[in-house]
Amino acid sequence: MIKHFKLLYVIFAIKSILYIYSLKTLLMIYITRREHFNAAHRLFRSDYSDEQNLQVFGKCSNPNWHGHNYTLFVTVSGEVDAATGFLVNLKDLSVIIDQNVIEKLDHRNINLEVDFMKGKLASTENLAIGIWNEVVSPIKALGATLHCIKLYETENNFVEYFGG
Ligand code: NI
């Protein structure tokens, strides 16, 4: 008989945990802020000849640099604040992106001037990872979780990074 009650108790506890978890999942929401920046770069390896760089990196290996109009989407997740109806205030999110990313990249040379890209190939992939690392902590401090960095280098080419 006691064994039977213990089993019921365990089932009740598991069902309660699943119910609380499902409520939490239901309240989870995602919100995205879009930003733009223009920046110059060159994709190359110094241990390759110009010909090898052209073969591997194409036009982006042009020794005299070139620019792109980048579009950045920063998606964060969290729960809706009952008082405001917001996940986060988008103005606050915009300020974080502006201070930590846009000011460092806009109208800059990614290879030469951007601290978090020092020593890295200036590819869209590496840039998206670098941007993630710049904003992940401030977004956490804002009370949200960074979900995705989506970065368009051209209209047709973009990368998405969801963290390590
Ligand atoms: Ni390029």
Image (cartoon, helix red, strand yellow):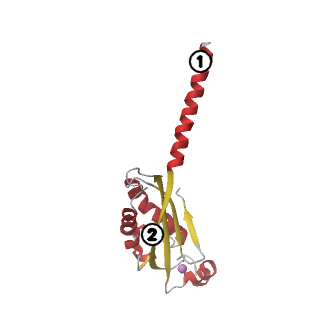
| Mark 1, secondary structure of its residue | helix
Residue 5 got which mark? 1
The answer to whether residue 126 is left or right of residue 100 is right
76 shown above or below 94: above
Residue under the image location 61 percent in, 80 percent down: 52
Going 53% across and 41% down the picture, which residue do you hit? 21
Q: How much space separates mark 2 and mark 1, taking CA atoms?
A: 61 Å
Q: How far from the left and from the top, in percent, is residue 1? A: 62, 12
* Mark 1 Cα-neighbour bin, 10 Å: few <14, some 14–19, many ≥20: few
Considering only vertical position in the picture, is 13 above or below 30? Answer: above
Residue type at mark 1: give it.
Phe
The image shows a total of numbered marks equal to 2
Residue type for callout 2 = Met
| Rendered location of residue 49, percent (x, y) | 58, 81
Look at 49% across and 76% down and name the residue there. 70
Front-most of residues 26 and 160: 26
Please give the label number shown on residue 117: 2
* Residue farthest toward the top in the current orientation of the protein: 1
